[in-house]
């Protein structure tokens, strides 16, 4: 990944985190003002909870972008990586939708029970997204199992070879022995 891409994604993630902090500050401020004036304290508290939920979702998206694009510094080459990233992202969205619909249902049930249709539909959308994610997981499970891990990376070394080297290194077998050459030293044989 280029330096420009890292800086770009770092800026986007930082902007999302800043927006999240501002949303939380607005939520706290509105709730405090509502309690201080005594007007609609419960409504302002429910509004504040809604804003905090949105702020957490925005912060999670920023964190997700930073982890995937800056820290991990990798492209999604294997289906298992793409599947994991998509699952993380969709989980953030589903949790935010569920919590927001819960807050809206509470507000609607308290103020106007006739207005409960929209929050209920939002909850159904969250459930449909969860079912869709589960279906995606089930269908993509066969794809990730069918594609071997021995796809070579940039260094020309396959994932399967790296795992084999790692397992043999734990057993004390050195690199020459892995290639079939006689190894002068094996761990645990008393030779130096």
Image (spheres, rainbow, N blue to C red):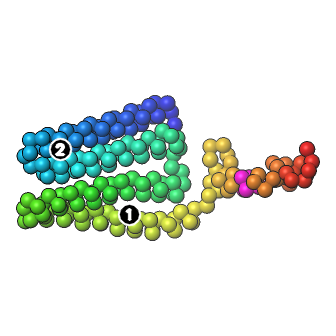
Main SS of the magenta segment?
A: helix
C-alpha separation, residue under disc 1 versus residue under disc 2: 35 Å
107 sits to left or right of 17:
left
Q: Is residue 2 magenta?
A: no
**Residue in the image at 23% along x and 60% along y:** 102
Quarter-wise, where is residue 117 in the image? Answer: bottom left
In this orientation, which residue lies closer to the viewer: 20 or 34? 34
Mark 2 residue element = helix
* Residue at horizontal 28 percent and vertical 62 percent from the top: 126
Question: In the shown orientation, is residue 151 left or right of residue 170?
Answer: left
> What kind of element bears circle 1?
helix
| Residue 159, numbered circle | none
Query: Which residue occupies 8% across, 59% down?
Result: 111
Toward which corner of the image does residue 91 lie, by quadrant?
A: bottom left
The spot of residue 159 in percent (x, y) is 65, 53
Dividing the picture into quadrants, the one containing residue 28 is top left
Q: Is residue 25 above or below residue 105?
A: above
The span shown in magenta is: 164-168
Image quarter (top left, top right, bottom left or bottom right) of the C terminus = top right
Q: Foreground residue, 144 or 13? A: 13
- Give the residue pinned by disc 2: 31
Q: Position of residue 137 (x, y in %)?
A: 44, 65
Locate residue 166, reporting x and y percent: 71, 52
Q: Mark 1 and 2 residues: CB-CB less than 8 Å, in contact?
A: no
For disc 1, the marked residue is 133
Q: Which residue is more in the foreground, 165 or 2?
A: 165
Query: How many residues crowd around disc 2 within 10 Å: few (fewer than 14), some, or many (20 or more)?
Result: many
| Residue at (36% x, 54% y) in the render | 92
Q: Is residue 179 visible?
A: no
Neighbourhood count class around disc 1 (C-alpha, 10 Å): few under 14, some 14–19, many 20 upward: some
Image location (x, y in percent) of residue 29: 19, 38
């Amino acid at each position: 990944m280029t330096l420009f891409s890292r800086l770009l994604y770092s800026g986007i993630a930082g902007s999302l985190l800043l927006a999240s902090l501002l949303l939380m500050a607005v939520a706290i401020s509105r709730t405090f003002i509502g309690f201080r004036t005594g007007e609609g304290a419960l409504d302002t508290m429910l509004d504040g909870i809604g804003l905090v939920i949105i702020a957490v979702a925005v912060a999670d998206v920023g964190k997700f972008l930073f982890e995937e694009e800056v820290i991990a510094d990798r492209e999604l080459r294997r289906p298992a990586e793409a599947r994991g990233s998509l699952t993380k992202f969709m989980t953030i969205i589903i949790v935010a939708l569920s919590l927001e619909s819960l807050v809206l249902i509470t507000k609607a049930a308290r103020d106007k029970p006739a207005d409960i249709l929209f929050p209920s539909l939002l909850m159904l959308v969250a459930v449909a997204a969860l079912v869709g994610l589960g279906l995606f997981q089930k269908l993509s499970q066969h794809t990730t199992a069918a594609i071997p891990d021995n796809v070579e990376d940039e260094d020309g070394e396959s994932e399967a070879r790296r795992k084999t080297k790692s397992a043999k290194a734990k057993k004390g077998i050195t690199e020459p022995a892995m290639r079939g050459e006689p190894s002068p030293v094996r761990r645990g044989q008393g030779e130096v």
